[in-house]
Image (spheres, rainbow, N blue to C red):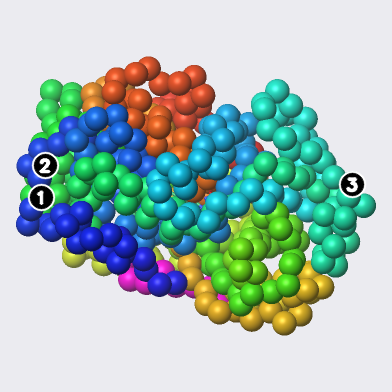
Amino acid sequence: MSMLSLRSHVPDDVIAAADSLPGQADVVVIGGGIIGAAAAFHLAGAGLSTVLLEADKVSSQQSGRNWGFVRTQYRDPLELPLAVEALALWPELERELDAPIGWRRTGCVFVAATQKEMAAFAGWHESTRNIACDARLLSARETVDLLPSLRGKTEGALYTASDGQAEPALATLAFAQAAARLGVRIIEDCGALAIEIAGGVVNGVETEHGRIRCNTVVCAAGAQSHRLLMPLGLTLPQQSVRSTVSLTAPLPPLSEACFCGFGIGLRQRADGSCIIAADSTSDIDLSLDSLRAARFFLPGLLRHGSGFSLRLGRAFIDDLHERLAVPDRERTVARRPRIPTNSKLAARTGATVRNLFAGATGIEIVKSWAGRIDVLPDALPVLDAPSGIGGLIVATGFSGHGFGLAPAVGRHVARLAKGEAPAAILEPLRLDRFARGTYSAPHAPL
Ligand SMILES: Cc1cc2nc3c(=O)[nH]c(=O)nc-3n(C[C@H](O)[C@H](O)[C@H](O)COP(=O)(O)OP(=O)(O)OC[C@H]3O[C@@H](n4cnc5c(N)ncnc54)[C@H](O)[C@@H]3O)c2cc1C
């Protein structure tokens, strides 16, 4: 997948060169994915001078590589209120950010191939009755009516008409550009090495190009967040799961709704091309970090582990090499080579789509790429201002859900930065659930 850089989209002068690193800011946001960019936009909107640091390019990691589903459907009931809040914000984003982001309210459908899957959907539907979302169960007949191109035999489906989709890199860049227009200094190729604390409060960030004094830091460094938090004595058991995605050439209508079922996920874009991926098969590249976090993940792996392939290979060797060759303080920005795709899985996914939809006989895969999903043991994010370190805000571990959630997350981060009490819906997303051992196994596979 081609990397989109902010440089190609905005005049050069909104990207600060590393040699003009500001000495001071109200807030430093670490991480230029959609979470950091949305946070920076709302922080600047709240009148706080903000610097956004990105070790690579804005949108170069998960935020520019994801499927683009914006869904409330089948979310963990503990995360659902945040997802509902975020969904309500998406339709206004193009106007608010003044940029195209490809938002379309196309719905989302999860098709059940077995009675067991249908029972799981029904159980979720029942357990979320009190939360205002419009998910409904479809009979097998209704599922065929919704998806006339579908060939597979179904037991029914879970369908949410109000869910939608957007273009990942466009939406992330739109947040970053809008933040820049509000005065946020966005500094690419500049990793944060350490969050500095004095007397129990944040007082700066050490970066690869110098130090920035600040009283508030937002840690939104995706899969690297645990490396920034660990030296502060904070427990964030994080695992990276590698997922391969493909883009097809335009196809006849297959599914207007974002689709999951029969082991694949599919999003048909406005031009008919499809984003496709295996929805229940991912690779876990074992590393020293993943082994350290293993005990936290065991309950979830035992419950839903069938979709993961554990791989001991290149990532482990890279990790070992890094441990020996890279000083500890630089490991927070360790740059990894290209993320390898699982080409066998990509080919299998293409074949499944061809067999599953009448309109997909001529499917042609244009390109494939992979992304590393940062997962926490309960598959819920952390969105919290942990007590004990004044001025630290953590927004990370979005476990495959952060694209859709970002518009709401940015607003909550800005409120926390202004010193407001956390909203009640953030209670299950506290960081200390891991140190206390009060988290549960994920409600569903990723
Ligand atoms: C294949 C795939 C499919 C997905 N599908 C969906 C979906 O359909 N819907 C959905 O809602 N979510 C989906 N997700 C999840 C979603 O993409 C993520 O949850 C979301 O993008 C997380 O955003 P982020 O900003 O936290 O992380 P990222 O986008 O990973 O951004 C973190 C950034 O921090 C930077 N960084 C790291 N360390 C440092 C440092 N020390 N200093 C400075 N910068 C640093 C990184 O370079 C990176 O750019 C998917 C993810 C993947 C990979």
How many residues crowd around disc 2 within 10 Å: few (fewer than 14), some, or many (20 or more)? many
**Residue type for callout 1:** Leu
| Residue at 69% in and 48% down | 107
| Residue at 58% in and 44% down | 300
Q: Nearer the viewer, residue 416 or 249?
A: 249
Q: Nearer the viewer, residue 221 or 238?
A: 221
Q: Which residue is mark 1?
A: 21
Q: What is the x, y in percent for residue 98?
A: 40, 48
Q: What is the x, y in percent for residue 333?
A: 24, 56
Q: Are marks 3 and 2 in contact (CB under 8 Å)?
A: no
Q: Are marks 2 and 1 in contact (CB under 8 Å)?
A: yes
- Secondary structure beneath label 2: strand
Q: Earlier in the sequence, mark 3 or mark 2?
A: 3
| Residue at 82% in and 41% down | 137
Q: Earlier in the sequence, mark 3 or mark 1?
A: 1
Predominant secondary structure, magenta span: loop
Residue 384, quarter of picture = top left
Residue 29, quarter of picture = top left
Q: Bounds of the magenta span?
A: 333-344
- Secondary structure beneath label 3: loop
**Residue type for callout 3:** Ser
Q: Earlier in the sequence, mark 2 or mark 1?
A: 1
Visible in this render: residue 298?
Answer: no
Q: Is residue 414 left or right of residue 119?
A: left
Asked if the magenta segment contains residue 392, the reply would be no
Label 2 near ligand 1 (CB < 8 Å) = no
- Secondary structure beneath label 1: loop
Q: Which residue is mark 2?
A: 212
